Image (tube, rainbow, N blue to C red):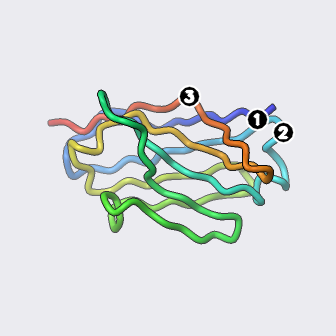
Amino acid sequence: QVQLVESGGGLVEPGGSLRLSCTASGAASGSIFSLYIMDWYRQAPGKQREFVARITSAGSTNYANSVKGRFTISRDNAKNTVYLQMNSLKPEDTAVYYCNLVALGGDNYWGQGTQVTVSS
């Protein structure tokens, strides 16, 4: 089984920063973690879940236009963890943030999500 646990969410003022973490365990941990594509998605109230950022096994990244230049995705394979550094946060970034693991066979695994609220 694959388990993903997100952390690092919270309440922050506009312009502030947060760093989210997503740690994999179970069948996704160990040296195999480095082979997986890892994504961050988010879902705001009343809206569909949307793509935020991706990092491949080779370390290539891509971002949604709405976060480009403000968010940075990274990974530490030794810790089975992917991060999302979020700077210059805006109220419209308020959402539940989910990490997603794309397994080698194409299956997707999701964490339980972490709430990010940007408000003064």
Binning the other alpha carbons within 10 Å of mark 2 as few (below 14), some (14 to 19) or many (20 upward) gives few
Q: Position of residue 114 (x, y in %)?
A: 46, 32
Q: Is residue 86 left or right of residue 114?
A: left
Amino acid carrying label 3: it is Gln
Q: Quadrant of the N terminus?
A: top right
Label 3 residue SS: loop
Answer above or below: position of 32 versus 68.
Answer: above
The quarter of the displayed image where residue 92 is located? top left
> How far apart are labels 2 and 1 at the CA level?
5 Å
Q: Residue at x 51, y 48 (%)?
A: 40
Image: 64 above or below 30: below
Query: Label for residue 112?
Result: 3
Q: Secondary structure at mark 1?
A: strand
| Residue at (76% x, 35% y) in the render | 2
Q: Quadrant of residue 112?
A: top right
- On residue 27, the disc is 2
Q: Are marks 2 and 1 in contact (CB under 8 Å)?
A: yes
Q: Residue furthest left?
A: 120
Q: According to the image, label 1 marks what residue? A: 2
- The location of residue 43, given as percent across then percent down, is 39, 36
Q: Amino acid at mark 2?
A: Ala
Local packing at callout 1 (Cα closer than 10 Å; few below 14, some 14-19, many 20+) is some
Disc 3 packing (10 Å; few <14; some 14–19; many ≥20) = some
Distance of mark 1 from mark 3, alpha carbons? 12 Å
Horizontal relation, residue 86 to residue 78: left or right = left
